[in-house]
Image (spheres, coloured by chain):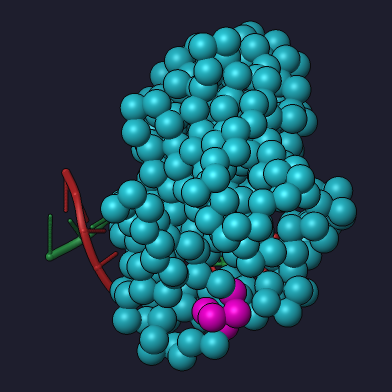
Chain colours: A cyan, B green, C red
Amino acid sequence: MTVYKQLLSLPENFSFRINLDYLKSTEDGLFRTDQESITRFIVLDGNLFFIKIYVSNNNRLVIETEDVSQSYTKQFERQIMLYIRDWFDLDIHLEPFYIIAKQDEYLKMPISKFYGLRNIGIPGIFEAFVWAILGQQINLSFASTLKDRFIKNYGKRLIHNGEDYWLFPSPRLIASLSMDELFKIGMSRRKCEYIRGIARLIANNQISREKLVQLSDINLAVKQLTAIKGIGPWTANYVLLRCVRYPNAFPINDVGLHNALKLAGSLDRKPSIDEIKQIASAWEGYESYATFFLWRLVY
DNA sequence: GGCCAGGTGGCCA
DNA sequence: TGGCCACATGGC
């Protein structure tokens, strides 16, 4: 099979090792990691590509693409590069964030420990919503178990070099399932309803990542999303942070954020919401990155 | 055994 | 608006 190789230059404040470590900690069947690379299948307009990502000696990102569907064109090559730039959030300029963070009581420790980390995204909006809804209220290890069951019950299994990879279930399929069919994997009936509801909205193109990007106003985006049953302020901000990439998305109610602030600030208790608003006022415009680095302390 | 987990909607005053 | 409560399940 033909393999195409592309290079992407990396910003100085990007550490492949730190980002690989992060991905390793969140491996979910959709992609795989080893000591030096990340691999996954991606689908573009129904065409399948297998990509391998690693770093070269002169600090460039190398992307090898196997042309599984025999349909590789310059157009797909561009789309694959955009996919990678987006997944690793390569187009954001983080210098101003690091300047703020270096003198911030709560951020100086995490940015020193994880210097070079990026907000590794959740590429698909449906995947982002499902992951957020699964994570509501329950502990993260159980949420991971549910995600694993969700992917392996309803997703598509692919094999490459004898190893399993999964494609995330399509919103169309999930929208068509019965409550009992969804309930069997062990999530609450409410989570089943929320997930099926969002699957319908996405399948009908009533919600899309592009539309949310175009709004370009976090308050409007949150207002629109929280009108949907099952999407509260936390879920809306989580999806805007991890997928749509609003730099000022801020899931202020997040328990993990509270624990991380307690740890980073050596507090004897978790801070109150009012205290967090006070703390975060120094991060204006970079709340998403502040949150992502703080999460890395506790997850 | 009880409480807390990467919350949310529904009910009640 | 603000205060409860249920929700599925696992870990401590």
Question: Residue A146: x percent and y percent?
Answer: 35, 64
- Whether residue A47 is in magenta: the answer is no
Q: Tell me the quarter of the image containing the C terminus of chain A.
A: top left
Residue A87, image quadrant: top right
- Determine whether C11 is above or below A54 in the image: below
Question: Image check: A196 left or right of B4?
Answer: right
Magenta: main secondary structure = helix
Question: Residue A111: x percent and y percent?
Answer: 54, 17
Question: Image check: A60 left or right of A140?
Answer: right
Quick check: can you spot residue A85? yes
Question: Residue B4: x percent and y percent?
Answer: 34, 50
The one nearer the camera, A166 or A184, is A166
- The stretch of residues the image draws in magenta is A171-175
The one nearer the camera, A194 or A73, is A73
Q: How many marks?
A: 0
Question: Residue A59: x percent and y percent?
Answer: 57, 14
Query: Looking at the image, which residue is at 64% across and 80% down?
Result: A200
- Whether residue A174 is in magenta: the answer is yes
Query: Looking at the image, which residue is at 65% across and 57% down?
Result: A71
